[in-house]
Amino acid sequence: MHQALRVPEVLLEIFAYVNTIPSTTWQTAEIFGHSIPSTQRTSTLAALARTCKFFHEPAMDLLWTEIHGLEPLLGCVARLHPLIYRMGTRNSSWVEDVEPLSAHEARQFLRHSSRIRTLNIKETHLQLISVIPANVYVFPRLRSLSLSVAYLNLFLPLTLHPRLLNLDKDRRIFVTRCSALEHLYIHIDNCYDIASRLSLLSDRIRRCTRLVTLSCPMLNWETWKHLSCLPTLLELEIDQGYDVTPSLSKGDVVNLSFLNITSLSFRVVDGAEIITVIQHSQFPLLKKFKFTAHYLYSEEAEQLFHALSCCKACQTLEEIIICSPDEGDLVPPDSEPVTPVPHFLCFTQLRTLQLWFDNPCIYLDNDILLQAMSSWPHIRTLAINYLDDHHASSEVSLRGLFTALTLCPQLHTLRILINLATIDVDPDAEPIQHTSLRTLELLDISQSQIADAEALARVISAWLPCVDKVESIGSTWDEVNKHLKSSTAATALYVAGAS
């Protein structure tokens, strides 16, 4: 063996690289949004672990870094291995009528648990592992944990809260060092009422003092305050699911400052509570903001836009994604259009803006679009779409579009509504070409037939030479796209002939 392989740092670097080599033959599945390595991928590390004693420990550490469920650990028990991996695949019914582990088998179960750093839990098979002593640190090196609210009491330490003790008196506890956790993903379930769930979340999350990433259901003000004091927290996701039960007490409103958070994501039914949190918070290093609500009334939407513009992220925010599909048609169809773009002009570093609204619609005209492009010199993706074009409201003309494009040379993708009732660009005028735009989607709200598709295709081809197709809903642009395709083919032949 080469002497370089005897240097631990070199060996670890090589093994880490082997563990990340992409391959078209490797297949992955997903649990809770996390990629699971295929059998072929893990077999490479397993082969390295069997090569020699010097390779064994570092290879095994990488092999067991991440597991999904407790079955891999249970598979280390000689009696259970053929049941779990029968016919070469995991058999979900293997656990039926299986006797609990003996003391000796518990040691087999725990053999590699100290290597695990990432654990994703869907099932626990508690009846099999009752022999393991309570309050033992089964996963002492755990850094990332993904589980539902139902398993919080199982994997994170108990409090002395009497109500919670009553809930867990018959459960075995896998104690994890909360203070060491860096990534925590908690998924909502129906095991607890809202009061018990908030108590669980508040207690467990407040014990985690080194969190870098947190994804969980809606929190109370006490927990929000705790999170604002975590200097390590960089990414926060709130996923309310379909729960509409209020979580915030109106009398406990506090002002918060999240000094280091760079990414915020919210998925809620009703946006009122999250808007309240944003109104009372500052995020001076925020780079990414994503907000999805089943519905937003016009007044709430404007409050959200204003609150985001006042959260001290004007010099840092690069990505904004807001979606409101109005599920259940709760917003009145005659609601006033909303105007988010003027609120966002302060975000001078904006690279991506995606706004998807069904109802209320978003108002946009030539002046607003021109202001936006002059305020966002780094913008690469601008998508202001509507899930229902019958509610659309746009006064952007073709001339207004081309004028605005001259101010954003890095724009790659553009999706907006446009009014083509009149074509206000002369096909023979000298164009100012935009050579970065590749994806163009225009929804014509005038719903009028394009009178001269060939002339319009010539205009688009002259001003936007890298666009060979205008995407849209329906067949409005079909004729234009035929001429664009012909023009692109002719240009390619000309270039090939010249070379």
Image (tube, grey):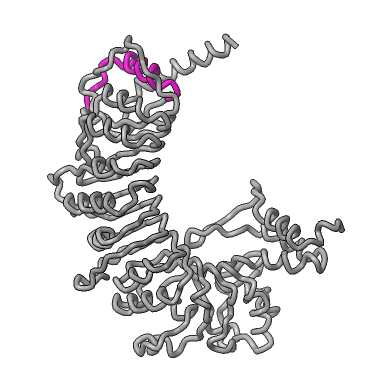
Is residue 299 on the magenta stretch? Answer: no
Residue 238 location (% of width, % of height): 36, 62
Q: For residue 83, say whether it is visible.
A: no
Q: Is residue 38 above or below residue 61?
A: above
For the point 33% across and 68% down, which residue is it? Answer: 224
For the point 79% across and 61% down, which residue is it? Answer: 7
Between 257 and 133, the residue placed more toward the observer is: 257
Quadrant in which the C terminus is drawn = top right
**Location of residue 399 by image quarter:** top left
Between 340 and 82, the residue placed more toward the observer is: 340
Q: Is residue 30 above or below residue 135?
A: above
Which region of the structure is painted magenta? 447-467
Q: For residue 238, say whether it is visible.
A: yes
For the point 29% across and 75% down, which residue is it? Answer: 194
Q: Is residue 484 left or right of residue 422?
A: right
For the point 36% across and 67% down, which residue is it? Answer: 217
**Location of residue 496 by image quarter:** top right
Q: Is residue 436 above or below residue 322?
A: above
Residue 319 location (% of width, % of height): 38, 46
Residue 108 location (% of width, % of height): 68, 80
Q: Is residue 288 left or right of residue 128?
A: left
